[in-house]
Image (cartoon, helix red, strand yellow):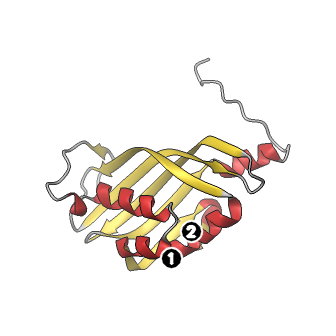
Amino acid sequence: MSQSPKECLPAADTSTDPRWIVNEYLRILMIPDPVAASRFVAPDLRIRFTGGRMMRQPAECAAFNASRYAWVKKRIEKTELMEGSSSAEAVVYSLGTLHGAWPDGTPFEGNRYVDRYVLRDGLITQMEVWNDSAEWLLVRAGLATLDTAPADA
């Protein structure tokens, strides 16, 4: 399967479009309603969360988020279907930023994330999650600084 983004029109039935499935899964998971989000995942779901944490259920993601944040939501900027994807197997990337509040109530926004999903026959079988939260926590602890200037500055 090629790994370049595929630009294409949404399927006539959006509920079968892998991008729609991922976006709807994320919308429901971020409520958080992991029970309802489970309808989009296969029984053999494998999740690799930030820090390499292995999980098997959407409820584990929601529980981890509840331990790290007072609340958190995703602002989805792009959802990309990879070239070569089919109804049998699709790879989808979701890119954007997190916003919310840390456990002490301090708000944050602009925390970058990238999620990678593998769908088989319309169900999510793999989910990989990366974001900048660990970097931001290091800064909050006084252990690091962030240079947020543009690379070409």
Q: In the displayed structure, would residue 93 be above or below residue 127?
A: above
Q: Which residue shows up at 25% across the image and 72% down it?
A: 121
Which of these two is toward me, 4 or 94? 94
Q: Amino acid at mark 2?
A: Cys
* Quadrant of the rendered image containing residue 126: bottom left
Q: Amino acid at mark 1?
A: Gln
Q: Which residue shows up at 65% across the image and 24% down it?
A: 149
**Structural crowding at the residue carrying mark 2, measured as other residues with C-alpha within 10 Å and reported as few (<14), some (14–19) or many (≥20):** many
Q: Where is residue 111? Give x, y as percent.
A: 60, 44
Q: Are marks 1 and 2 in contact (CB under 8 Å)?
A: yes
Q: Is residue 54 left or right of residue 102?
A: left
**Structural crowding at the residue carrying mark 1, measured as other residues with C-alpha within 10 Å and reported as few (<14), some (14–19) or many (≥20):** some
Q: Kindly identify which numbered label has been placed on residue 57.
A: 1
Q: Where is residue 57? Give x, y as percent.
A: 50, 76
Q: Is disc 2 placed on a helix, strand or loop? A: helix
**Residue at the extreme top:** 153
Which image quadrant: the C terminus? top right
**Residue at the extreme bottom:** 43
Q: Which residue shows up at 17% across the image and 54% down it?
A: 11
Q: Which residue shows up at 27% across the image and 65% down it?
A: 89
Q: Where is residue 18? Give x, y as percent.
A: 29, 59
- Spatial distance from mark 1 to mark 2, Cα to Cα? 7 Å
Q: Which residue is mark 2?
A: 61
Q: Where is residue 127? Give x, y as percent.
A: 46, 65
Q: Is residue 132 left or right of residue 142?
A: left
Q: Is disc 1 placed on a helix, strand or loop? A: loop
